[in-house]
Image: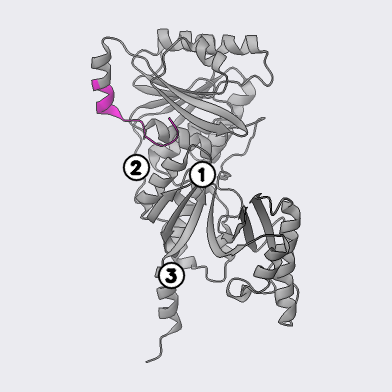
Amino acid sequence: MAVSTEETVRKEACMSFEMIAKTLQGLEGILADELRELGAEQVQEGCRSVSFRGDKAMLYKANFHCRTALRILLPLVEFKVVEPSHIYDALSQFEWSKYMQPTMSFVVDTVAYSSCVTNTRFACYRVKDAVVDYWKKKGDIRPAVNAESPDLYLHLHVSEDKATLSLDSSGESLHKRGYRVVQLETPLNEVLAAGLILLTGWRGETNFIDPMCGSGTFLTEAAMIALNIPPGMYRKSFAFEKWLDFDAGLFAEISEDDSKERPFDFCCYGYDISPMAVDATKKNVESAGLSQYVKVSRRPLQLFSDPPLPAILVTNPPYGERLKVRDLTEVYKLLGERLKHQFTGGSAWVLGYRDECFVQIGLHPSAKFHVFNGQLPCEFRSYELFAGTNKEHKTLMAQSFTPKKGGTR
């Protein structure tokens, strides 16, 4: 008996295949946990990546739900590269008609850690030539390269003599959630912000405070985590929506399911000395539809007092690009003084990269995680501010929430 097209599509959707989720260094463990919770199989942590297996629904879920993924890749072919010409040789023979039509535009991105391939731009040209010549040999029209809004995103990864060509199912990096309407200089990456909050173990069990909130990335991501709102809900599109096998019904079922959202009985509080920062935060929070859960006001760090406890504090002080080191250390000294005298009973987490600044806080960290903020090697340190004995405090914290083990200690 012949198998219907509908049955074939359904079987293909249930087939398991390998995928790779890219992330920031230090967040691999958190991303692996996210993928397991979504139902991914054979999850393995790598360097700035996590490999896993799943079906088409899993690919859609990973893009829509993962807070710490930058992009989700679908490996198509692996081959050996001793010299750049081997890229063309391997990919001109690849059966491109399975994944694209000649009328579709495409773009190529290359990452290489190899003595065999040292010019990534030339490697991109070799991939482009292979795709175009494949269709020319078939007598079809030449597919166009479109760097702005392509129909297909191709990703070439070369590690020494091993090359992997993948389809990028995300397109624009997943850290670009879509809610940010006002951007200040050097905003915190949304994936990093979400990953750091998840590292603390906080999921909305207390209030959340950022006394130097900038454009509000920590506050917005915290509210989304507390309410369990998927980060993908603000995105206009994903690259997989233009794939030949895109299942619009399946994706609608995933993206419209709000059954796992939860109530948030506390609030996220943000403060900043800059009126521009406060205005930017308010507009970004409003864009995300979270104004009910995020309260922002102008207040210098010197006036940080009487915080709404119980609370966790997470902040990213200035790094010194526009401040003298002496002024910068004064900021950290003031932060430590405010924490010691105004935040008793709370848990504070600080992201920074200068040891001399951390020293000024004057508190012993209970945990340290190594991460990168852009190109800067940073530390994310935890401080427990408590009254009474250490034993009493640990018992109280154990009843509240527990920091994750992800990242590098």
Amino acid type of the residue tagged 1 in the rendering:
Cys
Quadrant of residue 187 in the image? top right
Tag 1 secondary structure = loop
| Of the image marks 2 and 3, the number of the one nearer the N terminus | 3
Left or right side of 40 for 244: right
Q: Which residue is mark 1?
A: 47
* Residue at the spot of label 3: 13
Task: State the image quarter where residue 383 is shown.
Answer: top left
Is residue 139 visible to us here? yes
Q: Is residue 285 left or right of residue 4?
A: right
- Give the Cα separation between the discs numbered 2 and 1: 33 Å
The residue nearer to you, when weighing 216 against 19, is 19
Residue 135, placed above or below residue 207: below
Identify the residue at the far bottom of this view: 1
Labelled pair 2, 3 in contact (Cβ < 8 Å): no
Q: Residue at x 74, y 73 (%)?
A: 133
Label 3 amino acid? Answer: Ala
Q: In the image shown, does 290 or 251 lie closer to the viewer?
A: 251
Q: In the figure, is residue 208 to the left or right of 139?
A: left
As helix, strand or loop, the secondary structure at mark 2 comes to: loop
Residue, disc 2: 262
Mark 2 or 3: the one toward you: 3
Identified at 40% across, 28% down, the residue is 267
Residues rendered magenta in the picture? 395-409
Q: Quadrant of the N terminus?
A: bottom left
User: Per the image, is 64 magenta?
Assistant: no
